Amino acid sequence: MKVLVNDQLIERDEAKIDIEDRGYQFGDGVYEVVRMYNGKFFTYEEHIDRLYASAAKIDLVIPYSKPELRAILDSLVTANNVGTGNVYLQVTRGIQSPRNHVIPETPLKAVLTASTSEVPRDMTLFEDGRKAIVEEDVRWLRCDIKSLNLLGNSMAKNKAHQAGALEAILHRDGSVTEGSATNAYMIKDGTLFTHAADNLVLAGITRQVILRVARENGIPVDESGFTLTDLATADEVFISSTTIEVTPIIAIDDKPVGDGKRGPITKQLHTYFTAEILKQCGELAFV
Ligand code: PDD
């Protein structure tokens, strides 16, 4: 298995990271997870645009042009022969020795690393759904940046895992923001509700596709968010991300959502979403 360190393809166990890399010491960097189906990238441009946008928000200069980055990533996925899987890439601000919170005025050499994993589509996820818990959102106020600082996300997700759930649905003062690694939605009386793409959530690429196909197919969309009280009486709830597509939430804190099964609008949205994958990546083994 090859990994990428800057523009070099090397064996996974030969990769070395400097102990004073600011990504390692401060979580000072940005990342993306891009899905591939049938050896083809899905929504590649959107992910890469968001990577550069996240970097710009923290004044981190990515030392590659978008075409250069594409060529490097293409060489990685070709070397690893990725079929249906995930490409993880991150860019840290670089190595600063000695450690100092202050960011040097002269830009450091940013460090790009990337790896791949083969991950088939899990149809049980989409059809059967999973449980969630509700947790307070204790993260910072710039969740629009896809930064490497994921401790708040990771601790919430781990709490869900310990409770036998897939995801923690987060809230600030009773207002639902997103999942620990997903966007969160509810359906009430036929309308799809989700949080606005502001500083409190990540503007998910999957979210972007879902909202577009919902509107194209006449499902009303409301981006003004929803509360925990709304969530408790929702007809349907689902979460979305690059890796889990449109996954129904069938119980929250062990109380069933609706009748405890995937709802009809969630199912419809996943069908529309799958059609988008087919358009970009061709026939799928499981539809
Ligand atoms: N997570 N919100 C958060 C906090 C996320 O970490 C993610 C993605 C999303 C969904 O974004 P997208 O649809 O662009 O994947 C929303 C990735 C998959 C991860 O950290 O593994």
Image (cartoon, rainbow, N blue to C red):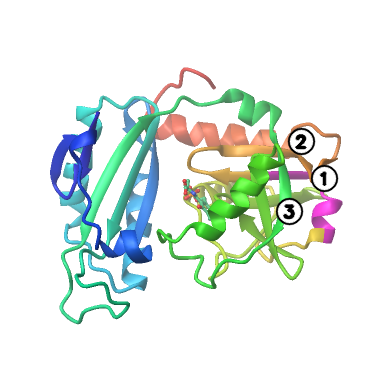
> Residue drawn 70% across and 27% down?
128
Picture coordinates of residue 246, whole percent (x, y): 60, 39
Q: Which residues are magenta?
A: 229-238
Chain-order first, disc 1 or disc 3: 3
| Residue 231 belongs to magenta span | yes
> Circle 3 is placed at which residue position?
134
Location of residue 264 in the rendering, given as x and y in whole percent from the top left corner? 75, 34
Label 3 neighbour load within 10 Å: few <14, some 14-19, many 20+: some
* Residue 160 x, y percent position in the rendering: 67, 45
Q: CA distance from mark 3 to mark 2?
A: 20 Å
Q: Is residue 280 left or right of residue 106?
A: right
Residue 263 shows which numbered tag? Answer: 2
Mark 2 vs mark 1, CA separation in Å: 8 Å
Residue 253, how many percent across, how many down?
79, 46
Regarding mark 1 in the picture, which secondary structure is present there? loop
- Determine the residue positioned at 20% across, 50% down: 69
**Residue at the location (19% across, 70% down)?**
97
- The answer to whether residue 167 shows anywhere in this view is yes
* Residue type, label 1: Asp
Q: Identify the amino acid type marked 3.
A: Val
Camera sees residue 214: no
Along the viewing direction, whichever of 132 and 232 lies nearer the viewer? 132
**Residue at position x 69%, y 39% from top?**
165
Q: Is residue 197 left or right of residue 103?
A: right
First in sequence: mark 3 vs mark 2: 3
